Image (tube, rainbow, N blue to C red):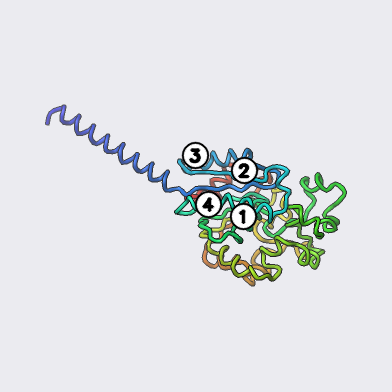
Amino acid sequence: VSLLSVVQILMTEMILHLVFLSIALLDAAVGYRPVIIIHGLFDGPKQFTNLASFISQTHPGTNVTTVDLYDDMASLKPLWDQVKGFKAAVGQMMENATDGVHLICFSQGGLVCRGVLATIPKHNVHSLIFLSSPLAGQYGDTSYFKYFFPKYIKTKIYHLCYTLFGQKISICNFWNDPHQRERYLKTNNYLALLNGEREHPNLTQWRKRFVSIKKLVLIGGPDDGVITPWQSSFYGFYDSNETVVEMKAEDWYLKDAFGLKTLDSRGDLVQCMFSGVHHTSWHLNYTVYKDCIEEWLT
């Protein structure tokens, strides 16, 4: 065999290798489902450029969108109002994604996502990722609340939140005072409905939509500093003595009120507890992304 023939064979093999590699990379890029990010209180798309960059690094070609709605101060608007806007935007993205989407919902955005999935006629969410969200409610004096309610402390805010006016403020839609249980159940028109704490005619349909997701990922940690108790990120919350009741001992889990127990029984509920991360740093932390998010974005 001549030297020229050997060179030609090697060149052919190299070209074929590059072609197959290119096809593999293209398939990988095309194969990743779109990722939709829903921001939290006082946030907007600009806060999530790092997270979008992380996704692009590990999943090249992924379509990542942080929905640009109810940014900054507008995030204080009632959550049902926000759900309407986000539902229209997310619904359109779902229609364009025939193989489904992934949802990453940060902080208050987790509760917005709950409302969207409960009320959207049909969704195709594969991974629903709650990144430090007050899923069981909030009861704590954090800088967020002291800034906007300077005359109130946690034991007094219910006087505002558990009124018709208070329910027009997003924070009050998930304020859960364990010492004012009756008032919470009577006046809360958002979280108490989503978590099945109060009976309503839509609960069965909402539950059906919730359990139709493929994977539920809960992320939070003890050094969050804002979500109080921090176990709310894992559907745990205070009892009347301010002792934390873990998720599996909560009534809504035991009764499977909105499908949480079903997802867990299926093996489709993942909990990722991370220490040393402050609330505003979850979406900036690459280690959190690698350990808790990356594998669910296929």
- Sequence-wise first label, 1 or 2: 2
Q: Which element carries disc 3, helix, strand or loop? A: helix
Q: Is residue 62 above or below residue 111?
A: above
Q: Is residue 168 left or right of residue 204?
A: right
- Sequence-wise first label, 3 or 2: 3
Identified by mark 3, the residue type is Gln
Q: Residue at x 55, y 41 (%)?
A: 52
Give the percent coordinates (x, y) of residue 133.
66, 53
Which of the two residues, 221 or 203, is positioned nearer the viewer here? 203
- Sequence-wise first label, 3 or 1: 3
Q: Quadrant of the N terminus?
A: top left
Q: Which residue is mark 3?
A: 57
Q: Residue at x 60, y 55 (%)?
A: 218
Q: Which element carries disc 4, helix, strand or loop? A: strand
Identified by mark 2, the residue type is Asp
- Tell which residue pokes out farthest to the left in this image: 1
Q: Which residue is mark 1?
A: 113
The residue carrying pointer 3 sits among few (fewer than 14), some (14 to 19) or many (20 or more) residues within 10 Å by Cα, namely few
Q: Which element carries disc 1, helix, strand or loop? A: helix
- Sequence-wise first label, 3 or 4: 3
- Sequence-wise first label, 1 or 4: 4
Give the percent coordinates (x, y) of residue 51.
57, 42
Q: Is residue 240 above or below residue 161?
A: below
Identified by mark 4, the residue type is His
Q: Which mark is residue 102?
A: 4
Identified by mark 1, the residue type is Cys
Q: CA distance from mark 3 to mark 4?
A: 17 Å
Q: Which mark is residue 68?
A: 2
